Image: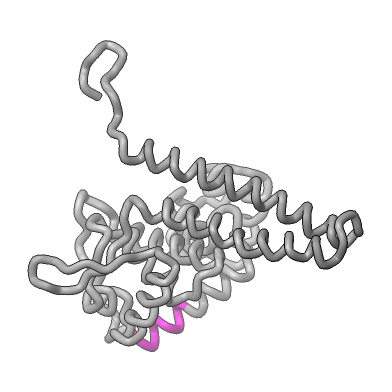
Amino acid sequence: MPGGRLTQQERQQIAIGLADDLAYAEIARRLDRPTSTITREVMRNGGAAGYRADLAQRATQQRTRSRGQAAVQVPQAAPQPYGRDAGAVRDYEEALTTVFATSGLPRMMARVLGCLYTTDTGSMTAAELARHLQVSPASVSKAITFLEGLELVRRERDQRRRERYVVDADLWYRSMIRSARSNDRFIETARQGVGVLGRGTPAAARLENAARFLDFVSEGLLRAAEQGREVLHTGPGPAPDGTAP
């Protein structure tokens, strides 16, 4: 029935449709479901590339149990600006959190980052994060310390002298620079190994090739990061006819 919950068989059909590169609308048509239902289902369970029917079914069962156990504690979704659908925003935040988590971030850190990214201001206080995520201030503090160490967030004081945690336009630039610099130590150590193992030996050649590859990639990454940052901070120029964009 179009209005009911998705069954495990339907989730398997969604997974098959995604594997066949079908559009969400086509999968929805085959299941006699609204396209929005399929979109939300996929987004909250790893996205098109990471969707698995068994994991999606298990996650839904866990969410259902959690909602039943804490129904009194969970607040209603706050009204959204710009006419956004509060449920869709919540599902998207969960999907974004899953992407951050599958890229290597611990779950709590991924939740904080996903929350910050889906605010228009790009910043929240510890109290706001704790209230939104329904976690303790200590959990937020630990997550912020971790993310700050990776330069994925920064702290600032607002006009009321409250500490706010911010994600800004330079976040990915700093992330790329850190990624490139993290290769430097291995490159240096690998080239030391060439001298120890003897140039021209199989082991030394392996280390030398790895060092050359990472050196080349890091150089290109740094150059691309600088160029990307320059584009990011340069406003769009006038249109060909001289009018403002």
Provide residue 132's location: percent of width, then percent of height: 28, 74
Question: Looking at the picture, how far across and down is residue 65, in whole percent?
Answer: 45, 83
Image spot of residue 24 (x, y percent): 52, 46
Where's residue 103, x and y in %?
A: 55, 64
Residue 65 lies in magenta, yes or no? yes
Tell me where the magenta segment starts and ends, as one range. Answer: 63-70
Q: Residue furthest top?
A: 241
Q: Nearer the viewer, residue 134 or 54?
A: 134
Q: Nearer the viewer, residue 21 or 156?
A: 156
Q: Name above or below for residue 122 compared with residue 222.
A: below
- Left-right relation of 68 to 206: left
Quadrant that contains the C terminus: top left
Is residue 22 among what the camera can see?
Answer: yes
Left or right of 244 on screen, residue 152: right
Q: Quadrant of residue 113?
A: bottom left
- Say above or below: 215 vs 148: above
Q: In the picture provided, is 207 more to the left or to the right than 221?
A: right
Classified by dominant secondary structure, the portion drawn in magenta counts as: helix
Residue placed at 51% from the left, 42% from the top? 223
10 or 192: which is nearer to us?
A: 192
Q: Residue at x 50, y 80 (%)?
A: 62
**Is residue 66 inside the magenta stretch?**
yes
- Which image quadrant is residue 183 in? bottom right
Residue at the left extreme, as displayed = 160
Residue found 67% across the figure and 59% down from its top: 187
Residue located 40% across and 65% down the image = 151
Q: Nearer the viewer, residue 97 or 125?
A: 125
